[in-house]
Amino acid sequence: KSASSSQQSANNPVSTIPELDLSKKAFKEAVVRHLHSTLGTDENKANNHAWFKAASAAIQELVLNRLRKTQKSHYLNDTRAVHYFSAEFLMGRLLSNNMHNFGLFETAQAALQELGVDLTDVLEEEPDMALGNGGLGRLAACYIDSLATMDYPAIGYGIHYEYGLFRQEIKNGAQIERPDNWRDYGNPWEICRPESIQEISLYGYVETKYGKKGQIQKEWHPGAIVKGLPWDIPVVGYGGKTVNVLRLWESQASGYFNWDVFNAGGYVDAERENVEAETISKVLYPNDETEAGKELRLIQQYFFSACSLKDIIRRYKRAHGDDWSRFTDQVVIQLNDTHPAIAIPELMRILVDRAELDWDSAWEICQNTFAYTNHTLLPEALEKWPARMIEKVLPRHLEIIYEINHRFLSEVEKKWPGDNLMKAKLSIIEESNEKMVRMGNLSVIGAFAVNGVAEIHSRLVKQNLFPEFDALYPGKLTNVTNGITPRRWLKACNPLLSDLISKKIGNDWPLHLSKLDDLSTLADNKTFQNAFMRVKQKNKDALAKEIKQLTGISVDTKAIFDIQIKRLHEYKRQHLNLLHILALYRRLLENPDYEMHPRVFIFGAKAAPGYALAKTIIYAINKVADKINADVRVNQKIKVVFLPNYRVSLAEKMIPAADVSQQISTAGKEASGTGNMKLALNGALTIGTLDGANIEIAEEVGDDNIFIFGNTVEQVEALTARGYNPYDYYYNNKEIKAVLDWLDSDYFTPGQPGELSPLKQSMLDGGDPYLVLADFESYSEANIRLDEAYKDKTRWAKMAILNTAKMGKFTSDRSIEDYVSKIWKLEKCGIE
Ligand code: NBY
């Protein structure tokens, strides 16, 4: 006991949790006990993986204790809860996070050290839980962290994918996708709950019948039944009091519908159907910003939405029986994009066909249950399903969608009599060649609140995407600016900076991030500047080691570490960064005395496997990197590094080491961005456009502490309207012409001319849809300003400190409070 209290008091505000023994001695005993009795090994034989399993099991004991208490408390208080429906939860690793949230990290480190084990090595054994693509999935993970931390009753609902986002390998510069076998050696956190299995239906036909009072009744005769087996992942709040649950559904054959086939000797056919059922939760679709339109994806969406709704209703009925009148007091469902929007007609089906409520009562419940978050304006990302596909998979749901639409269109008629264009625009059904169901329209109509994810994005949702809905439903469309959890994205990933901050301003900033503003007064303090930059240097040294290990490339740790990490997409403009690198390369070749501070350009990005140009951009970055890194004429000044397999755990190593954060999307295209927040929080300076949350970051840090460039949303609109011609820039800017022609040669791909030509092609004859050339010059100038600023060490240190100091707004705790007050109307419920 005595040893532990001194261990924890240094840096943890959360060391006293009643009843639980959080001492070093207790932890050590638990780890050894699990090594023996759970892992069947001992201290001498155990490898790092066994230690990881034993340490996780020791922590899980505490987690499950708090989980039980939380669930009891929620049950006894009959709390209203938010149900966060998301096809993706990008959780990353959990051991370090859970240790931090119990205030046990240092204790565990010391305990393991006494056992002769290095915690850092143990943590590396944990596979990332990569059940998401990018920002949208990671946002869901940050939000469930904040919900638990702030004692809000909440449950995350999603899919238990057998394979998460693919593992990326780079072979000869090109991306190769490999399966992500994240559960090969088990997952120490998840709990299987066979007692809560749900069954859902698919396919079949709808029978129209007449009820006792002559009313029309619909009965869906399904063609298949699939089981959903829930796996619960405990979500530990910071301070270790509330532990909520992330419930992920795994699909299984029901073994019910295939009985006849089986008895008739159709063993093989029955097995085939089993395989099909089990395919549903097999793999995460790796597309981030394009809608796939595949039947299996629709089935995934329905599968997890329907299982989750049944789960919610079962729990509601246990407390309230068949009385639906309190449902919307108890339940709010947040739809993370339109991926779970099929839940809207599913709830209508349950209420009308099963509970036999009249349509209007059912619709009122529905409209008071759902809220919808929009994450994109890109047309290719707005989900649309062929009506025929919905009819085949979910015949009753298509009827319900038509009925919702029919009633909705008469509202439109009341508001805009005779306006058929308006009806065509707002209709859930798009009457194109092939009839399509617009999931965005369905979501806006079926939800009581719709939010965008940054101020500018929400304004554009109102003005450009859904202006008529905004007129029809005043107040429904709103904003909640995204946020990130400072526990994972500063405290856990950057211990050196965290300790420095805690020493200066106390240790409750992880819960009250605005306190970081107290650092502002130290921004001019020479001693603090030195300490701050010493931490940055150590983090850069560590990343340089990692780079060496992963790629073999040596980098100068005194160079500027310039980082662009995010999914590969044209709108995010990694190719603008690349063109600028080529321009610098060319300037250095033309003038070996060209003045610039050495800079290492570091990338991390996965491309959707079917997105050819995105893969070409990765290939181009790697080919340019090979050339530059081997060119002794320039490689003292620039290096280019592409780190393979970018993922949460790699981000945690890269972000603390960044001097510069590249946030260079075409204005109007990046809904928010959240990497921008993580990097600035860790003291990186942003070079960025006035897009997404960059605008709010600029407001917080002030124009002097950020490098803004490029066309604004208004300028982009004007430029596009008057007819943008990239050739104007190609012929008028000789640097642009030279670097594009360079890419078109075989300089970077010796003997293989044309391999990089699709890049030039897309920026010229392809029309340069994301205005790379239009922003190039302004970007190049911003880079010169940045380079100037870095030369002045004092100025840079001050700017970096102010970036950290001014990030308080971007804690996901603030986002959650915004959701609670504007949309969810929850009350906190702690445990005794
Ligand atoms: O959501 C991202 C936005 O691009 C980013 O600006 C924002 O900060 C973040 C959180 O709000 N969107 C995103 O990550 N989208 C996806 O990952 C995604 C995944 C799947 C599909 C579409 C988009 N899909 O259609 O399957």
Image (tube, rainbow, N blue to C red):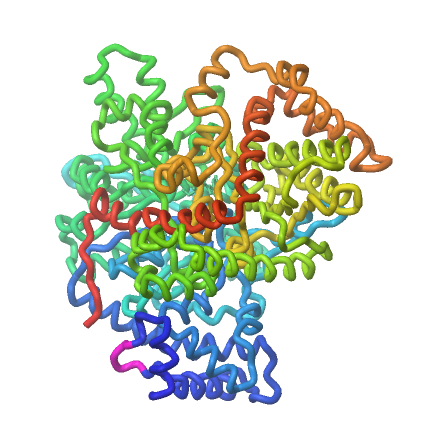
Image location of residue 291, percent across then percent down: 50, 36
The magenta-colored residue range is 16-20
806 left or right of 367? right
Relative to 609, is 38 on the left or the right?
left
Image height check: is 199 above or below 369? below
- Residue 409 in the image, given as x and y percentages of width and height: 27, 22
What is the quadrant of the N terminus in the image?
Answer: bottom left
Q: Nearer the viewer, residue 440 or 606?
A: 606
Q: Is residue 685 visible?
A: yes
Q: Is residue 17 magenta?
A: yes
- Principal SS element in the magenta part? loop
Q: Quadrant of residue 191?
A: bottom left
Residue located 73% across and 57% down the image:
552
Quadrant containing the C terminus is bottom left
Residue at 78% in and 29% down: 754
Quadrant in which residue 192 is drawn: bottom left
In the displayed structure image, the side of residue 174 where residue 286 appears, left or right: left
From the top left corner, tell me how far across and down residue 762 is, in percent.
Answer: 65, 25
**Residue situated furthest right in the rendering:** 751
Who's the residue at 86% across and 35% down the image? 751
Is 618 left, or right, of 722 in this rendering?
Answer: right
